[in-house]
Image: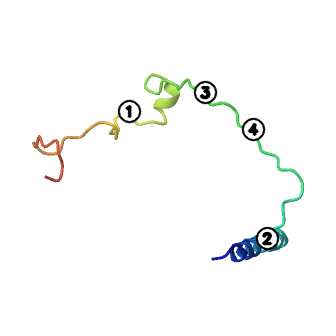
Amino acid sequence: MKSKDLALIALFGVIAAVISYVVSGMVFEPPVGSTTVPEVSAINPNFPDIKNDSAYNVIFNINALDPTQPVQIGNQNNNIPFR
């Protein structure tokens, strides 16, 4: 390719970029005015003691299963599943 060809390709690229910028500005109009975002208060890091607080004993079932505890099903000691 000659240098004239490269310059012509670069010129067409710049013209296409300018046209696409103008057309996208017509299609996608920017929002008018300013946007207000609500502020969120900080999360309290102190959690209530649900086991000893009487207010939570009414809500939570003390005898319920704890899904975070490991459950042993059967008498297998297989530590590597699917083997």
Residue at numbered disc 3: 44
Q: CA distance from mark 3 to mark 2?
A: 46 Å
The spot of residue 73 in percent (x, y) is 17, 45
Residue at numbered disc 4: 39
Q: Is residue 21 left or right of residue 65?
A: right
SS at mark 3 in the image = loop
- Which circle, 4 or 1, is nearer the viewer? 4
Image quadrant of residue 24? Answer: bottom right
Task: Report the residue at 83% width, 68% height from top.
Answer: 25
Quadrant including the N terminus = bottom right
Q: Is residue 4 left or right of residue 22?
A: left
SS at mark 1 in the image = loop
SS at mark 4 in the image = loop
Residue at numbered disc 1: 62
Depicted 10 relative to depicted 34: above or below: below
SS at mark 2 in the image = helix
Which amino acid lies under the numbered mark 3 shown in the image of this protein?
Asn
Which amino acid lies under the numbered mark 1 shown in the image of this protein?
Ile
Which amino acid lies under the numbered mark 4 shown in the image of this protein?
Glu
Q: CA distance from mark 2 to mark 1?
A: 61 Å
